Amino acid sequence: MTPQEAENGRRRIARECLKELMQYTSDEQHTAILDKYTPKFKPLNHLRFPAKRVLGYYVRTLQKEMKDGGCN
């Protein structure tokens, strides 16, 4: 798997997670949704941080891109 394919996979999982997160407002529901997507994200985690934390970072990055209307 190339680095670009891995990045695309991480962003795809984060987009799926974000789509589901936007339907709920409570912290407990957000935690449960992140827990649900973490096992899918874990094999693609390229950083030394926990997979759940990195997934949250990708979700926040996608939210910012959606808000700003563009990509970096």
Image (tube, grey):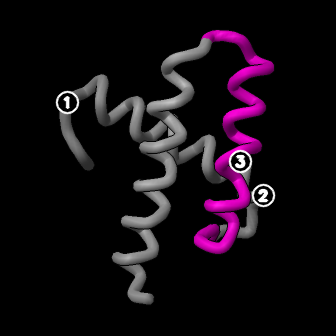
Magenta residues span 25-46
Of residues 59 and 20, which is closer to you in this image?
20
Quick check: 52 above or below 2? above
Is 59 placed left or right of 24 in the picture?
left
Residue at x 26% of width, y 49% of height? 72
Q: Specify the principal SS of the magenta part.
A: helix
Disc 2: CA contacts within 10 A as few (<14), some (14-19) or many (>=20): few
Q: Are marks 1 and 3 in contact (CB under 8 Å)?
A: no
Residue 29: percent from the left, percent from the top?
A: 73, 21
Closer to the N terminus: mark 2 or mark 1?
Answer: 2
Magenta segment includes 26: yes
State the CA–CA distance, disc 2 to disc 1. 29 Å
Closer to the N terminus: mark 1 or mark 3?
Answer: 3
Of residues 25 and 2, which is closer to you in this image?
25
Q: Disc 3 marks which residue? A: 53
Magenta segment includes 42: yes
Q: Are marks 3 and 2 in contact (CB under 8 Å)?
A: yes
Q: Disc 1 marks which residue? A: 69
The total of numbered circles placed on residues is: 3
Q: What is the quadrant of the N terminus in the image?
A: bottom left
Residue at x 69% of width, y 65% of height? 42
What is the secondary structure assignment of the residue under circle 1?
loop
In the rendered image, which quarter is residue 47 located in?
Answer: bottom right
Q: Which mark is residue 50?
A: 2
Disc 1: CA contacts within 10 A as few (<14), some (14-19) or many (>=20): few
Q: Are marks 2 and 1 in contact (CB under 8 Å)?
A: no
Q: Amino acid at mark 3?
A: Arg
What is the secondary structure assignment of the residue under circle 3?
helix
